[in-house]
Image (tube, rainbow, N blue to C red):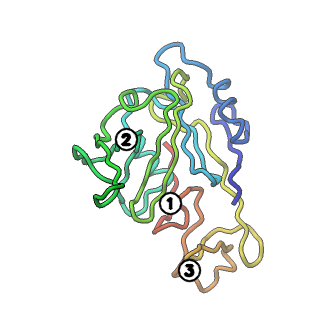
Amino acid sequence: MASTSSGACRKCQRVIAKTQMTRHLKRCLGPAESNGQYLILADMPGSPYWAYFTAPRNVTLDRIDDVLRRMWVECCQHLSAFFVNNVRFVSDPEPTSSSAFGGLFATRHVERPLSVTLKQALREGSEFRYEYDFGSTTELRIRVLDDQMAGIKGDVAVAARNEAPEVACATCGQPATALDVQDWEPVPYCETCLGSMEEMWLPLINSPRTGVCGYEGPSVEP
């Protein structure tokens, strides 16, 4: 699937290419008169999946984790974490942790709880990553593009999101609706061509986790 795509601005409903969406949202949403919100971009580099959010400064990383799970990744209640510089934000933090089993090249992180607010953890220009499931990991890049935006509504809200990618059936070329996951690389099929493979397929969802682990959606926006 192509890594570039378009999506609709939630305020004006115009369909804009991702490459132009940041500029459009800053102009369309405009700056806040007071209590500016963050404009955040979450995406998976090299894929067509992305979403812009507005979020108040007092919203916690716990809430962002919940939004990402409901909209994009939740399948089997796996663990997740945010990584901001050398800080790892998790649900049950320890004073320090290592990304390897010791040794010369082990990378150590300070751990902090997901209950911290965006204002405490981030600032404009911050770029960090989010990981869901430390086995079949889905890794997202998250960037803070502005911190003085007028929000869509009071809580975390989607400002724009990629339209569902068009995926062709591997057999007939018609729009695919499911992925055959019998082999290492999922294969897309339409409902007709899926045929007898009903026990080994997953639905095709507008999500960077589609075809991974047991992910079946639904994709629920905040």
- Look at the numbered disc 2 and give the secondary structure of its residue: loop
Reply above or below: 212 against 115.
Answer: below
Q: Who's the residue at 37% across and 41% down the image?
A: 86
Residue type beneath disc 1: Gly
Comes first in the chain, label 3 or label 1 = 3
Other-residue count near label 2 (Cα within 10 Å), few / some / many at <14 / 14–19 / ≥20: few
Task: Quote the CA–CA distance across marks 2 and 1.
Answer: 32 Å
Q: Quadrant where the N terminus lies?
A: bottom right
The residue carrying mark 1 is 217
Comes first in the chain, label 2 or label 3 = 2
Q: Who's the residue at 73% across and 41% down the image?
A: 17
Q: Who's the residue at 49% across and 33% down the image?
A: 126
* Residue 183 numbered tag: 3
Q: Who's the residue at 68% across and 73% down the image?
A: 190
- Look at the numbered disc 1 and give the secondary structure of its residue: loop
Residue 172's spot in the image, x, y percent? 77, 77
Extreme residue in the right direction: 173
Nearest to the eye among marks 2 and 1: give it. 2
Quadrant in the picture for residue 115: top left
Task: Quote the CA–CA distance across marks 2 and 3.
Answer: 37 Å
Reply above or below: 14 against 5.
Answer: above
Residue 142's spot in the image, x, y percent? 51, 41
Residue 69's spot in the image, x, y percent? 44, 51
Nearest to the eye among marks 3 and 1: give it. 3
